[in-house]
Amino acid sequence: MRNSIVIAIAILFSNILFSQVFEPIKWTSKIEKESDDVYLLYFEATLDKGWHVYSQRVVETDEIAPTATEFTFTNEDKAFELVGETIEPKGIEKFDKVFEMDIKYFEDEVVFIQKIKHIDKSVKVIKAEVFYGVCDDEKCLAPEVIEFVFDLDKLTANIQTDGDSENTESAQIIPEIKKNVNELASSDVKEEDLDQKSSDKKGLFAIFLIAFLSGFAALLTPCVFPMIPMTVSFFTKQSKTKAAGIKNAIIYGVFIIVIYVGLGSVITAIFGADAMNELSTSVWFNLVFFTLLLLFATSFLGAFEIMLPNSWANKVDRQADRGGVLGIFFMALALAIISFSCTGPIVGTILVESALKGGIAPVVGMFGFSLAIALPFALFAMFPGWLNSLPKSGGWLNTVKVVLGFLELAFAFKFLSQADLVLQLHWLEREVFLAIWIAVFGTLGLYLLGKIKLPHDSAIDHISVGRLLLALLTISFTIYLIPGLWGAPLKLISGFPPPMSYSESPHGVGNTKGMVSLNEELPEGAKYGEHDIVSFVDYQQGIAYAKEVNKPVLIDFTGYACVNCRKMEENVWSQPDVLKLLKNDVVLISLYVDYKKELPVEEQYISKTTGKKIKTIGNKWSDFQITRYKANAQPYYVMIDLDEKNVIDPIAYTPDAKEYLTWLQKGLENFNK
């Protein structure tokens, strides 16, 4: 009897010692009535020291990214409506080298608040779910879903976990949370750190600079350039004194700026400070602007002209004859209308790009563009002698217009690419995108060399030195793009083409480096994983293959949003000795615990270990890890034999490559005994 007790205690302590099931986060909830039909729903998470949960605002990307916290509200009967977005506090923001993006997360305690308006008074219960993932500096846990039920009559909230519920009576909201919901709602704006403000300023300056340079490009088009001497001569001849001429020209320039900045202000007012920014991920938004830029490009290349009605120009021109300040304003407006066929596509492109930034970016963009347009008129009016140094109008103006057309055409495919990425159609993968850019810029190079002529081009006997230099630059850029088809990173255009992972061949066309022979077929259910390691994503298929080849199995419990899983793959698995073993001596099974694809209904079940419903493939592998290995963190590595028994104790995050290699070698040695 005594021996049995000792053994039982030993087993108990052994389970405690080796169990790695973490529960670092606890959720509670509260509800507060703000008015007769408005309620505040509070979701409060308390985290153990060292653990963090991520913000709702995680950049959508095809690459790895943190698990964003997501709130879902059941509202099939339309009993209520959400008032604004779910509010979250400022949190901690930093650039993460693994994810290669800015991330935001919360430690210790975090409170999310959702305001709702109660519409159907017969419905007394509001149901919500929160999907989240938690990590510390060494591991991440599989994402989970917690269900909440809010009782509007009793002002209580329950947390439900598959039949069990924990009642949390309504209590007075803690002062730090209660302060002001509106204050919390705007905290991300009011309390931005200096780095974020600096980043915004840099972004606006970049937009201003691009727009300013675009304005100078617009000056060199057939619609604008010839108007410089005409307009300046008008002011100098009509003004009684030189000073009056200069003053009128300056007023003219100011009105040009006012007109274009007014256009930017209208765009901002119509769409709001952030609406366009939110639309940037919309499929329809990207398709519409792909079509617009395609039309702009076709117009610049000479197929047709985009013009405002002539009646507009005639009416404005008659108003300009009035003279005085009002007449000067209408002269500036006439310039904007008459030159629209050349400036319209450029203005449209700037507005699209600046609108993606949101805020006052459209105003800043239009200010930069119009300033570049207005400056020459004022400067040439001040120094009329400079007019003699201007080049004569001619075919070179149309060349500028055609070059802009090619650039518009190239940029148009960026928007089409965005739509394709969102829909995951794989129609415009990286190779296709690069092939289109190579064709566009290669054709532009031939055009600049005079090998191709377009409808409005003048006959030329030779090309200028400037045109030759631009042709050489364009051809050099085209040659630079070509290796991108074979996997070159092309850092100069980073952010324009789709990512390497969104590709027909992620390693580049024809690149078989590190892979088995192309003639060798992959085992059923296998794929090429990190570093071209043959891996399985289904446990049973991996086990079956291991028995065929008589090799031990390395189970890799991982996650798409697991930072340290990527660190292990990039820094440890990449080491030659480790990589050699992973490729040749083990069968790798990578089980992703955050894979959201739902299991067929007949395969869904309630876990006997946790009591939770297993609905997704990720849930299945997470439950498998918890049930069999009493662990729920990733990364987690288990080496087993053909009878599915451990050949060595499992390990977790091991950034020391030598230590990880020793573990692999010891496991292989035990398997071969």
Image (cartoon, grey):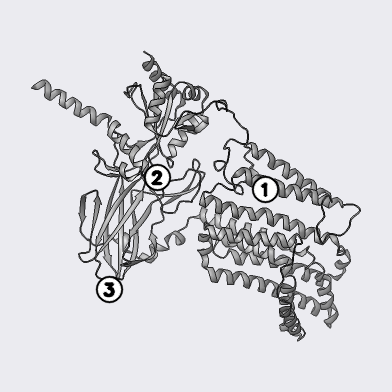
Q: Nearer the viewer, mark 3 or mark 1?
A: 1
Three-letter residue code for mark 3: Asp
Q: Position of residue 472 (x, y in %)?
A: 79, 46
Left or right: residue 509 compared with residue 622: right
The residue at 70%/75% (across/down) is 255
Mark 3, secondary structure of its residue: loop
Where the N terminus falls, by quadrant?
Answer: top left
Instruction: Tell me the crowding category of disc 2: few under 14, some 14 to 19, or many 20 or more residues within 10 angstroms, Cα based.
Output: few
Q: Position of residue 494 (x, y in %)?
A: 61, 46
Q: Write down the quadrant of residue 236 in the picture.
A: bottom right
Reading the image, the residue beneath label 1 is 436
Q: Which badge, 1 or 2, is on the more N-terminal residue?
A: 1
Reading the image, the residue beneath label 2 is 597
Q: Position of residue 13 (x, y in %)?
A: 21, 28
| Cα separation between marks 3 and 1 | 59 Å
Three-letter residue code for mark 2: Lys
The reply to whether the C-beta atoms of the residues labelled 1 and 2 are less than 8 Å apart is: no
Q: Nearer the viewer, mark 2 or mark 3?
A: 2
Where the C terminus falls, by quadrant?
Answer: top left
Three-letter residue code for mark 1: Ile
Residue extending farthest to the front is 602
| Cα separation between marks 1 and 2 | 34 Å
Mark 1, secondary structure of its residue: helix
Q: In this picture, is 510 found above or below 119?
A: above
Q: Is residue 540 visible?
A: yes
Residue nearer the viewer, 193 or 161:
161
Q: Write down the quadrant of residue 48 in the picture.
A: top left
Reading the image, the residue beneath label 3 is 36
